[in-house]
Image (cartoon, rainbow, N blue to C red):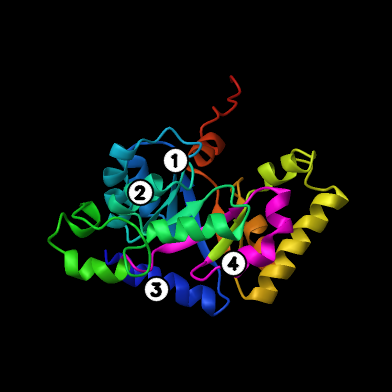
Amino acid sequence: MNRLEKILAIRQSLAANQPSVGSWMQIPHPSVAEVMGQAGYDWVAVDMEHGAIAVHQLPDLFRALEMGGTLPLARLAQGHAKDCKQALDAGAGGVIVPMVETAAQLTQVRDACRWPPAGTRGVGFSRANLFGKHFDAYREEAQVPLLVAMIEHIRAVENLEEILSVEGLDAILIGPYDLSASMGLTAKFDTPEFVAAMDCIRKLCRRHLIPCGVHVVMPDADALKQRIKEGYRFIAYSIDAVFLNQAVPAPTVAVP
């Protein structure tokens, strides 16, 4: 799979106000990644924040996703330069950055994701460029990896206009559980205060022409359609373990 072509295709779709629907992985096994990669998503985010996934497992997970033509992304544990470099060197096509609260924080992460001259990420042979075999071809991709900021705290909402003005930001992704918790309303998504915060985020994203994203955690096609109707464009659809939990319960069988 040509990662750069996939990155640019996702950007074109978002620029045309079309939804980009991906999914999420927390189970660190290449067979799960292979199944997810062949499911038809634009991208799948490998969760290094809440999933039990180590850096050394990324290459195999990414390879399995790429076999199905799905762009691998990494949801970083934190936005440290080391996290960015290790995920991208392993072959991620971009990063989803948790707990972004300021424009300065996002700018640091953006620079840490890009090779010079666009950024400050260390240049070297890695799995992303097949250990030097595709070094020259990788130069362009290393300038423009996908960058998605997670908005997960009320402070981020207060600073959102500045965050949305950061050059190179492709989309934002709302983390509703953390956002609600930061407001003292953990998982109380129907309260007027939380609904107002969500409305504010969508309004500012429209103003700045930055796609707004959300995670539809429970697999529900109608819920996905509703989120798209509401204006969300960068959407994570469920999680590998949630898919499994939904399908695995033993059926009740009546004894004749």
Query: Can residue 41 be seen by looking at this rendering?
Result: no
Up-down relation of residue 116 to residue 151 (above or below): below
Residue holding disc 3: 8
Q: Nearer the viewer, mark 2 or mark 4?
A: 2
Query: Can residue 241 be seen by looking at this rendering?
Result: yes
Q: Which residues are magenta?
A: 142-170
Amino acid type indicated by mark 1: Met
Q: Is residue 104 magenta?
A: no
Residue holding disc 2: 87
Residue holding disc 4: 233
Q: Is residue 162 magenta?
A: yes
Mark 2 or mark 4, which has the lower sequence index?
Answer: 2
Amino acid type indicated by mark 4: Arg
Q: Secondary structure at mark 4?
A: loop
Q: What residue sits 55% from the left and 29% below the top?
A: 249
Q: Quadrant of residue 182?
A: top right
Amino acid type indicated by mark 2: Ala
Q: Is residue 194 rendered to the left or right of residue 83?
A: right
Mark 4 or mark 3, which has the lower sequence index?
Answer: 3
Q: Secondary structure at mark 2?
A: helix
Mark 1 or mark 3, which has the lower sequence index?
Answer: 3
Up-down relation of residue 196 to residue 210 (above or below): above
Q: Nearer the viewer, mark 4 or mark 3?
A: 3
Mark 4 or mark 1, which has the lower sequence index?
Answer: 1
Mark 1 or mark 2, which has the lower sequence index?
Answer: 1
Residue holding disc 1: 48
Q: Quadrant of residue 181?
A: top right
Q: What residue sits 87% from the left and 52% below the top?
A: 192
